[in-house]
Image (cartoon, rainbow, N blue to C red):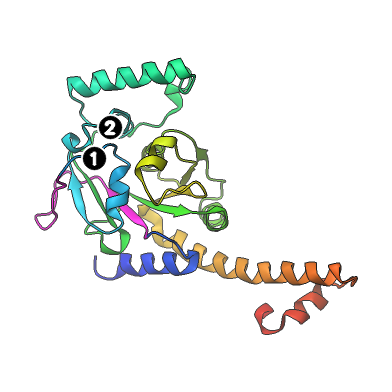
Amino acid sequence: MDRFYSQLAETLSNNLRLAQPPIAVCFPDSVPASITAHTGNAPAGCGFWREAATATFATSPGDHALCAVGSYTHNLEMSDQQQTDLKDCLGVFASLGYVTAEDLPLIPVLDRRPRHILYAPLAQTPLPPEVVLLFGDAGQSLIISEAVQQVEHRIPPALGRPACAVIAQVANTGLAALSLGCCGARAYVDAFTPDLILCALPGANLAAYVERIAALAGANSILSKFHHLRGRQVAAGARPTVKESLAAMGPAAD
């Protein structure tokens, strides 16, 4: 897509200092001839996120056959075996108190039935992404949530299990959301370490989020220096005014 998405990906990675590149998720009715179909088995749909950090590929419902939960949240056509697997999963979840009958209607499910799901590093996406996934720590997620608030004039929700449901949430609403993940996604996605959460942005307005993320990353950097300096000043016995602390920062406060 020319340099548009590669520039957005570069801005995100540089300003947020991301450990893993942003991932694009698309739901095309047909796959461009230049895109390779996924090969091999995946234990769960979230496993595709790991591969998408470095490769562009398309999946069909059959590629998600081993992940009944992901097939459910993505509203994929399911075989009889997947239906059985889903029922068995829900039975285990219920026995553990992990997902109750009351919980199930609250889990987002994609509001259309996709024929394909295309995954790619955002910088290399061949199609406009519907959802962009970012793995961020608390500081990075703070900046993302601040940007979402300024773009959408709302606080993004933080979803729980299953992590894949955040894609349906964002695709259905066109609004950003966070995911605290789930034990499955953290097992299948190496980059989803315990200190990270998943941030999902709608692709349709991605440039607006990226612009605010860049601005807020710079602001947070300056303000962090201000607060650390001010803390040292007070710890040393001073009672500085805000202007005095700003002056002590020098050019960084300009």
Q: Which residue ends up furthest to the bottom in the rendered image? A: 251
Q: Residues within 10 Å of mark 2 (few under 14, many from 20)?
A: some
Q: Is residue 26 above or below residue 213?
A: above
Q: Quadrant of the N terminus?
A: bottom left
Closer to the camera in the image, 17 or 241? 17
- From the viewer's perspective, is 40 left or right of 215? left
Which circle's residue, 2 or 1, is located before the other in the chain?
1
Instruction: Give the answer, above or below, for where 147 lies relative to 78.
Output: below
**SS for callout 2:** loop
Q: Quadrant of the C terminus?
A: bottom right
Which numbered dot is residue 42? 1
Report whether 209 appears left or right of 219: left
Evaluate whether residue 39 shows in this view. Answer: yes
| Callout 2–callout 1 Cβ contact below 8 Å | yes
Name the residue nearer the viewer: 73 or 155: 73
Q: Residue at x 38, y 40 (%)?
A: 187
The answer to which quarter of the image holds residue 84 is: top left
Chain part drawn in magenta = 21-39
- Dividing the picture into quadrants, the one containing residue 78 is top left
Residue 101 can be seen in this image: no
Instruction: Say whether residue 35 is magenta.
Output: yes
Residue matched to label 2:
67
SS for tag 1?
loop
Does the magenta run of residues contain 99?
no
